[in-house]
Amino acid sequence: MKLNLALLAAAATGVQVGAAIVASRLVVAEVPPLTLALLRYAIALACLLPFLLKSFRAPAHDGQGRAAIKTIATKDWLVMAALGTGQFAVLIALLNHGLQHITAAQAALIFSLFPLLTLLLSGVLGREDISARLLAGVLLSITGVALSLWPKLQAPHPGPWWGEAAVLASAGVGALCSVLYRPYLQRYPTLAVSSFAMLVSVLFLALLALSENWPARVLALDLHSWTVVALIGGSSGIGYFWWLYALKHESPTRVTVFLALNPLTAALLGVLFLDEALSRWSAAAILLIASGLWLATRGAPAAKR
């Protein structure tokens, strides 16, 4: 049986996302959301920058129908800049904000709606067919997320829902960008697209994070915080290359389904490193979400070209 590198990359990304959520939870009290997002992608960009510079010396075409970065049309640059800002800046800023209010496991469970939102958007845009199995899977996974929130819903004074709303919005932004990215990933080199997208997001975040006085906060970070941030940034650079590579070679449905590994990874690492208890509600929610994803993507057709 031939090893599918695209799906292997997608699975590795699912684990990386869960681990990054836990690591972000470790430092989010010391590093504000926008500043943490800025540092994350500045480090990730440093990992990918050599490949971006190399792309400018590539021939006009790579022999597989993909144009080199220097031949990209201006309108495509603008679209990829917008998608990069959404995928790498807005998504992570919202996720980091949510982690200030809820646990890593809760955030990962809500963020696991990412693949199902991707499925629905792909169907609405005519990129994939929406079947009865897909709708059943969506409902099952939404039930799982609702189950994870049930203890808070039953509390006499549940408090605000800003954390949950921010993480859900983060998943929605990621789903939209993943669907819209695919044509550009098929048209242009993966490293060039991902590097440029991160560059735009870093510039955007550098301006936005001035509201948190990020230069002073960065200088004040201790060794422990820097170590965690460096791990988050380095893994993100590798992880997002894997993600975009997978999106180039497989449909958004088949790729994002592996984000089901995200809540499981976050729950296990949260227990080990954050002393977060895995309640029976969360365990049941993980099972329902995984079942919904399996049902929604079982026998899913490849993306429409």
Image: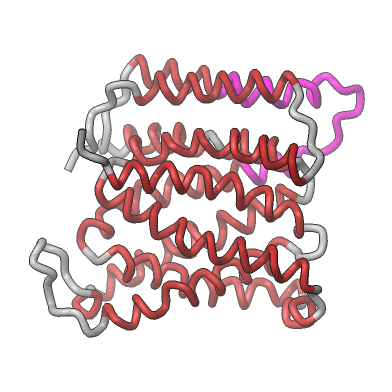
Queried whether the magenta region covers residue 281, the answer comes back as no
Give, as a single range, the part of the protein colored magenta: 142-167
Q: Residue 66's image quarter? A: bottom left
Magenta segment main secondary structure: helix
Q: Residue 247 location in percent, x, y?
A: 32, 49
Q: Residue at x 71, y 71 (%)?
A: 226
Q: Residue 83 location in percent, x, y?
A: 42, 60
Q: Residue at x 14, y 79 (%)?
A: 59
Disc tally is 0
Q: Residue at x 76, y 67 (%)?
A: 225
Q: Residue at x 45, y 32 (%)?
A: 116
Queried whether the magenta region covers residue 166, the answer comes back as yes
Figure check: 44 above or below 166: below
Figure check: 277 above or below 294: below
Q: Is residue 267 left or right of residue 274?
A: left
Figure check: 287 above or below 235: above
Q: Quadrant of the N terminus?
A: top left
Q: Residue 187's image quarter? A: bottom left
